[in-house]
């Protein structure tokens, strides 16, 4: 009985110790877990913070790339639109000029300017006249591009076409054609007068008519009475204004050895005034009708 009691007591004692040890181990294990939990949380928090920072960095990088791409697309679109706008503007400008030339040709049909539209632009014909007499015709072939260009023309070299083009062709086609028409009509009118003097009033001339290609400088010797024995007059006519058919400077001298009488001086002055105010053929027509007794109504 004593042994049994002893074993029983020892068993209870041992069982109590083991249980106690287990309880201690459990407590220690729990303590360790509690101590490790803050470190794990800190580690997880640190890793999460690093991940958040990395994601923010990637977000900012993506935003910058998107903005750069959008700016590039906008700039490209702006350039394309600018080019398209420029092209449309240029086409509209050329179209307006073409329509303007067409309107000018229609409006000027009765003023000696005519023409037709071509694949390049327009071919303009300028027909000259003087005192109702149709004279020469000249053409200008215009190319409707920017800037406007003259492709071909038949304008005489002594007409200042280049100067007229530089002033008006790019800014006012109508003014360009009108000015060119003035020059050509004036030249044709002066030439017509000189030709008439040589062909119709040769009997009045005491020598050949001298003239330059532009017919703006004429000089000749003539008699007021083709059948008379009077000394001839020498005339020099200068046309400084190339758009007119009347001279701007006239010099008439009496070709004689003696001093001029009062009558001769009056006659010389009257001739000079006539050349200022009347076309050549009209002046010599008056000589033919009146002889040296001038129709003073022509002088006034």
Image: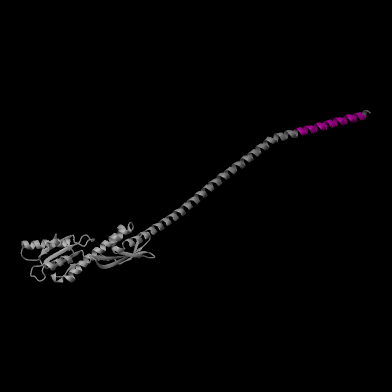
- In this rendering, is residue 184 above or below 23? below
The quadrant the N terminus occupies is top right
- Compared with 98, 34 (above or below) is above
Magenta stretch holds residue 189: no
Instruction: Tell whether 212 sits left or right of 18.
Output: left
Q: Position of residue 14 (x, y in %)?
A: 85, 31
Using residue 196 as the reference point, say whether residue 51 is left or right of it. Answer: right
Please say whether residue 214 is visible from this viewpoint.
no
Residue 124 spot, x, y in % from top left? 33, 64
Quadrant position of residue 294: bottom left
Which residue shows up at 15% across the image and 67% down it? 285
Left or right, 142 with respect to 85, comes to left
Is residue 217 visible from the viewing direction of this image?
A: yes
Q: Does the magenta segment cover residue 7?
A: yes
- Whether residue 182 is situated above or below residue 49 in the rendered picture: below
Looking at the image, which residue is at 30% across and 59% down? 176
Q: What secondary structure predominates along the stretch shown in magenta?
A: helix
Residue ID at (54%, 48%): 66
| Residue 228, position as x, y percentages in the image | 8, 70
Residue 235 position by quadrant: bottom left
Of 121 and 49, the residue lying toward us: 121
- Which portion, as a residue range, is magenta? 3-27
Coordinates of residue 197 in the picture (x, y in percent): 17, 68
- Left or right, residue 24 beside residue 85: right
The C terminus is located in which quarter? bottom left
Q: Which colour scheme is used?
A: one colour
């Amino acid at each position: 009985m004593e042994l049994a009691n002893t074993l029983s007591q020892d068993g209870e004692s041992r069982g109590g110790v083991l249980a106690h040890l287990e309880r201690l181990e459990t407590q220690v294990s729990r303590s360790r877990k509690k101590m490790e939990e803050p470190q794990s949380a800190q580690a997880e928090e640190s890793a999460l913070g690093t991940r958040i920072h990395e994601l923010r960095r990637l977000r900012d990088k993506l935003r910058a790339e998107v903005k750069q791409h959008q700016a590039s697309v906008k700039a490209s679109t702006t350039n394309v639109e600018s080019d398209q706008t420029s092209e449309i503007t240029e086409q509209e400008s050329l179209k307006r000029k073409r329509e303007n030339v067409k309107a000018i040709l229609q409006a000027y049909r009765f003023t000696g300017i005519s023409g037709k539209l071509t694949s390049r632009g327009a071919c303009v014909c300028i027909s000259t006249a003087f005192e109702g007499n149709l004279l020469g015709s000249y053409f200008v072939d215009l190319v409707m591009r920017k800037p406007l260009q003259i492709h071909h023309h038949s304008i005489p070299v002594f007409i200042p076409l280049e100067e007229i083009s530089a002033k008006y062709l790019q800014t006012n086609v109508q003014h360009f054609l009108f000015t060119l028409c003035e020059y050509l009509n004036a030249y044709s009118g002066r030439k017509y007068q000189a030709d008439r003097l040589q062909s119709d009033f040769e009997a009045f001339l005491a020598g050949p008519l001298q003239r330059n290609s532009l017919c703006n400088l004429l000089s000749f010797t003539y008699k007021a009475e083709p059948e008379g024995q009077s000394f001839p007059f020498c005339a020099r006519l200068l046309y400084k204004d190339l758009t007119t058919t009347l001279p701007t400077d006239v010099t008439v001298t009496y070709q004689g050895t003696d001093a001029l009488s009062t009558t001769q001086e009056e006659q010389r002055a009257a001739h000079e005034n006539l050349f200022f105010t009347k076309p050549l053929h009209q002046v010599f027509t008056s000589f033919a009708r009146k002889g040296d007794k001038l129709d003073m109504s022509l002088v006034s």
